[in-house]
Image (tube, rainbow, N blue to C red):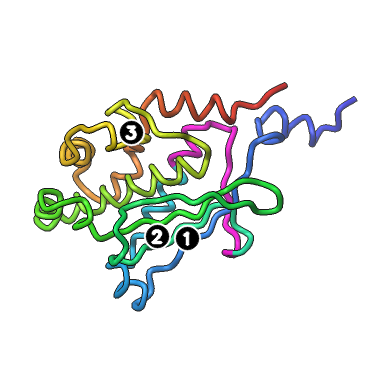
Amino acid sequence: MMPRVLWLLCAAGLLSAENFTYWIQPCTAETSRESTCDAHDPELAEWALTAWQKAARSNLTFATAAEARARIRVYWASSRMRLYGEAHPIVVDGKRGAAIYVNPDVTQLGDEVDAAASRDRLLRDAIVYLTCLHESGHALGLPHTGRFEDIMYSFGYGGDIVEYFERYRRKIAARAEIREHSGISDRDGERLLELYRKRP
């Protein structure tokens, strides 16, 4: 007979959930000088991971860890780097993960995006959040898609970059509302569940 505690864990869907440890680089004064990050940007990265956890239902959990023990590590990239977001595969204790680099300097996305974000701080925060969401999706094993609706969409397929971010911005009236609008499409969620749905 199954012990009651074990039965409760199974019933709650917690027994075989995949757990990812994570670490997010604090935005110190020195880091801010290098990357233009904001002191509250780590919170946006936290919200991105929370969004993926919700999308995975009970199949995925996250827990904080020291940098060296974390399967997902979020770094604020130097504004000198010619990239906006990138994820590099890593292995921790035999399990895959990724070192994520997010450049909060929106000038990397071109003059039009930079001009719009300079007029609208909330747009800038939305861009940083969506970049954290996209790159952490890669850390979880999701590849690029060609669907403009998806957070895993690649700009390599073309499309209106400004509109990609503006459509999300139109959903929120305050920074805190980012937590209410995940930015994850139905198809993104389906593909996540294909990877992490628990097997009997």
Secondary structure type for disc 2: helix
Q: Is residue 65 left or right of residue 104?
A: right
Q: What is the spatial separation of the Cα atoms under label 2 and label 1, in whole angstroms?
A: 6 Å
User: Magenta includes 65?
Assistant: yes
Q: Nearer the viewer, mark 3 or mark 1?
A: 3
Identify which residue is drawn at 37% across, 35% down: 152
Secondary structure type for disc 3: loop
Q: What is the spatial separation of the Cα atoms under label 3 and label 2, in whole angstroms?
A: 23 Å
Magenta span of residues: 51-67
Residue at the far right: name it.
1
Query: Taking 27 as reference, is 94 above or below it?
Result: above
Q: Which percent across, then down, holds residue 189?
A: 45, 28
Q: Nearer the viewer, residue 157 or 3?
A: 157
Quadrant assignment, res 2? top right
Q: Which percent across, then down, holds residue 57?
A: 53, 31
Question: Looking at numbered disc 1 in the image, what kind of residue is underneath it?
Answer: Ile
Query: Taking 179 as reference, is 200 above or below it?
Result: above
Mark 1 neighbour density, 10 Å: few (under 14) some (14–19) many (20 or more): many
- Residue labelled with disc 1: 24
Mark 3 neighbour density, 10 Å: few (under 14) some (14–19) many (20 or more): some
Question: Looking at numbered disc 2 in the image, what kind of residue is underneath it?
Answer: Pro
Q: Which percent across, then down, holds residue 72?
A: 53, 52
Q: Nearer the viewer, mark 3 or mark 2?
A: 3
Question: Looking at numbered disc 3 in the image, what kind of residue is underneath it?
Answer: Tyr
- Residue labelled with disc 2: 42
Identify which residue is drawn at 61% across, 64% down: 68
- Residue labelled with disc 3: 153
